[in-house]
Image (cartoon, rainbow, N blue to C red):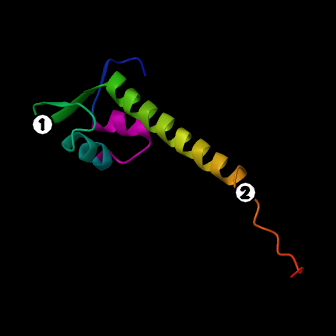
């Protein structure tokens, strides 16, 4: 994508979501956007930055979860001595 701006449909294509989802993100203030007439306009870099932020955060969460799974102490052994 070489254009500096995108509309709802363009942003939805970048994020692989429905345009309504992009509109919800705009209304929540998650992705900066402005209205020109009846159309939402976003900077392509802002949409990509949002995607990058999600990717980095979700990757970090998976790494933390994977470390927790691999570093759990083995269960205590049950001995019959007594």
Query: Is residue 18 in the magenta section?
Result: yes
Residue at point 50%, 34% (across, down) = 56
- For residue 8, the mark is none
Label 1 or label 2, whichever comes before in sequence order: 1
Position of residue 75 in the picture relative to residue 68 (left or right): right
Query: Is residue 25 in the magenta section?
Result: no
Q: Nearer the viewer, residue 64 or 56?
A: 64
Position of residue 50 in the picture relative to residue 75 (left or right): left
Give x and y (percent) for residue 1: 43, 22
* Label 1 environment density (alpha carbons within 10 Å; few <14, some 14–19, many ≥20): few
Prevailing secondary structure of the magenta residues: helix
Q: Nearer the viewer, residue 65 or 23?
A: 65
Position of residue 71 in the picture relative to residue 23 (left or right): right
Residue at point 44%, 42% (across, down) = 16
Position of residue 22 in the picture relative to residue 63 (left or right): left
* Label 2 environment density (alpha carbons within 10 Å; few <14, some 14–19, many ≥20): few
- For residue 73, the mark is 2
Give x and y (percent) for residue 66: 65, 48
- Identify the image quadrant of residue 26: top left
**CB under 8 Å between callouts 1 and 2?**
no
What residue is pinned by disc 1?
38
Q: What is the residue that sits farthest to the right in this orientation?
A: 81
Distance from Cα at disc 1 to Cα at disc 2: 58 Å
Residue 34 drawn above or below residue 25: above
Q: The residue tagged with tag 2: helix, strand or loop?
A: loop
Over which residues does the magenta segment extend? 8-19
Residue 66 drawn above or below residue 11: below
Residue at point 72%, 50% (across, down) = 70
Mark in front: 1 vs 2: 2
Give x and y (percent) for residue 15: 42, 38
């Amino acid at each position: 994508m070489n254009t500096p701006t995108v509309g709802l449909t363009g942003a939805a294509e970048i994020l692989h979501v429905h345009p309504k989802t992009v509109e919800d993100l705009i209304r929540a203030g998650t992705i900066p956007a402005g209205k020109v007439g009846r159309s939402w306009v976003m900077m392509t870099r802002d949409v990509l930055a949002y995607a990058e932020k999600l990717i980095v955060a979700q990757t970090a969460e998976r790494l933390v979860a994977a470390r927790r799974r691999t570093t759990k102490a083995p269960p205590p052994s049950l001995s019959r001595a007594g």
